Image (cartoon, grey):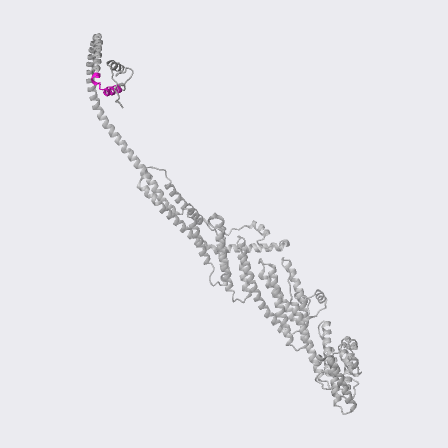
Amino acid sequence: MPPRRRPQFTQENIDQQLQQIHLLDQASSSENLEQLGPIIKQIHTNRQQDAYLRTLQALIQSKDAEIESICGDNYQEFISSVSTLFSIKSYTTNLREKITTLDASVSQVGRGLVEKKRALLQSKKTAANLDEAIDTLQACLRVLDVVNRVGEMVREGKYWSALRSLEDIESMPPTSLSQTPLFQHLLSSLPSLRGQIKDAVTASMKQWLLDIRNVSSQVGQLALDAMDHRTRRWRSRREKDPILKLSRVGSAVEVVTNEKNEFSVLDNEQLQVDFKPLYECIHIYTALDSLDEIRRSYQADRKAQSDLIIPSPLPLSSLPSVTQEIVGFFIIETQVLNTTGSFRSEREVEDLWDSLVKRLGSAVEGTLKNETDADAYLRVKEGLLGFIMTLEAYSYETSSLHSFILVLFEKYVSILEAKFGKRFESIVSQDDYLPMYVEQASERDSVLDTVWLARQERDQLARSALPLTLPWSQSFYLCCQDIRSYVQNFYQFIEGVSQHHRNIDDLLSKSLDTILSTHISESIARRAQSTSNFSQITQIATNLEHFEVACAELERSLTVIRSSQRGGIIHITAAASFASSRSRVLQRVNASIQSKLDDFFGLAEYDWTARTREQSPSMYLYELANWLTTVVDSLVVKDEYKEEAYRSAVDYIAECFMDFLAGRNVPMVNENAISNVLVDVDFLEEEFKRNGRGHLNAAFNELRTVVTIVMQDLVQDYLVPSVRLQSYSNVKPKHLQALLQKLARYGAECRDAPSRERGEKWRSAATAVGRLFPGESR
């Protein structure tokens, strides 16, 4: 590629370019050199420096010639201007000299003024520094005074003011004091001062806790006294108004009534409990964001205090003071719970309550473990009842205490049963079992008001003339009297107790059944078994009959009482025990009669192989019939019991006669002896008919039928099933067989042939009868 040719500038080109350059632009306040750069660069590039310089020199000379021409035209004006300038210059020089002289003078004066001004400024600066120092010191003094007053306020118990003062120091606006080491030191000491306030308020609360522990017993006593007054006032009102009879203390009606008689146990004429230390402590700890810490500490302290309330073991004499302290303790807890917001939780108080109630129950139960005095249980119940009602008014859960009282009640009833059981047994054993005798109407009315009788008998006795012999003995009256006392003691324990009526009714029913059945009925039955006196035994039977009636009357009267108290029905089942004992006593009467009858039959002198037949009865039967009639008719018992005694006696007489004929004690008999026995039976039947007891003769039916079969030789008829079933159904085959065997044995002992034949005949008949019922002949 051929080299590029450089452009060549002619003289005309250069001149043209120089003409275009205006180094001094009249319209511009700065030199215009921008256009010169590209030209010089181009000249340098084309290596035409010499040509350029020559052209430039020629331009300069041209311009100089123009200037000289211009100056030549204005020379005179110029000279004149120069002369004027020189004159001005001389004036200016003189003026400068004057100004210099004046300036030196002014400088000399101003230099002193500046020194004074500088001194003044320095003084002002020093004064300002002093003012600032004074202000700072005064601020320090104020802060130190606040800090000093914080200590005084802590000592005076003004904890909240002290804490606020510290907050005021901490929240001071930024000042010159804020940067001082003293202020920084004070700020660093604020946590320590807060700690002192915290310790002081904590110590104040600890002292308060000690103080309220000392007054808790007094608070509890005032509360229990107020509840006792409230209870007596309500009892008086219930007695006046039957509508309120079933409303107990604490019921809705009673609570509304009691609102008019509000009494504060924490603020009254006798006692004022100040909660300010606690409230201050809570407030301070809340401000310090440490409420949980004081809450835990308070709970631990109160737990420790509650643990010290109940001593171990717990003397019964100390129970009132212990319950007073517990009541005061939880009244204060209720006040704290209601007035401190979230500081105290219901759960924490309930835990303390449950723990203390559990320990109280265990302590009381341990103390009463070996106690046999029922009055001690009553005293404990009275103490706990007031305690329960008082704390129920403060909404504490007392169901466990009510259950505990019912447990104590069961033990109380057991002790009461044992105590009265011994008294009943003593009454039964010491009674002479003679009918009670009253002479005065007051005596009769007192007895009738004490015992339980059927209305008809009560009305009859009340209308009877005086003096009056009552149908029962002293033991019946005394037992009824003690039963009333027992029931009174029973209900005395549960008076005021919020009990489950059905449980109480069941317990009373079981307890009365135990007393009536075990301690009275069985004791009477044992006394009857150990008594041989006939009149005493019959009096015992009469007493038992009245006891049996008394059970039903007692059940009805107790049910009426309980229904008025919204209770249930009392069920007394001891009547069956008295009926059983009465049956045994009547059996004892019958046994006594039978024993005497045995004595009479022991006097009998029958000849069982008599050669002749008697026309008159045995002599012992006269005495027997006379004695039986006299004794049974003289019994002071119901006619039905007399009838039963007669029937039993006649049945026994019939058995004795049958035993003579069919028993093993008599080896053999003949027809004459059987006829003589039949004569005696006829005599007794006539006696019974004469005394209006002819219906009792049915007891001799089997004996007469057996004798008829033998004496009329009707054995073959007896062997016929249809005849036997129709005519001889009352005859026991073994009795007929035994009598036939005895006749056969007698015939076998005889020497004459007819008798021996009859004996063989009886033997065959006995064998035939034995085949009918082989099991009965054994």
- Tell me, yes or no, whether the highlighted magenta stretch contains residue 671: no
**Magenta span:** 36-52
- Quadrant location of residue 712? bottom right
Residue 777 drawn at (x, y percent): 71, 81
**Above or below — where is 748 with respect to 396?**
below
- Quadrant location of residue 165? top left
Residue 644 drawn at (x, y percent): 72, 74
Left or right side of 46 for 397 = right
**Above or below — where is 688 with respect to 294?**
below
- Tell me, yes or no, whether the highlighted magenta stretch contains residue 43: yes
The residue sitting at the bottom extreme is 751
Residue 690 seen in the current view: no
Residue 70 drawn at (x, y percent): 22, 9
Residue 4 drawn at (x, y percent): 26, 21
Give whichever of 760, 24 is nearer the camera. Answer: 24
Q: How many marks?
A: 0
The quarter in which the N terminus is drawn is top left
Residue 528 seen in the current view: yes
Q: Residue at x 74, y 89 (%)?
A: 748
Left or right side of 434 for 385 = left
The quarter in which the C terminus is drawn is bottom right
Task: Please tell me whether the stretch drawn in magenta is mainly helix, strand or loop.
Answer: helix
Left or right side of 418 for 213 = left
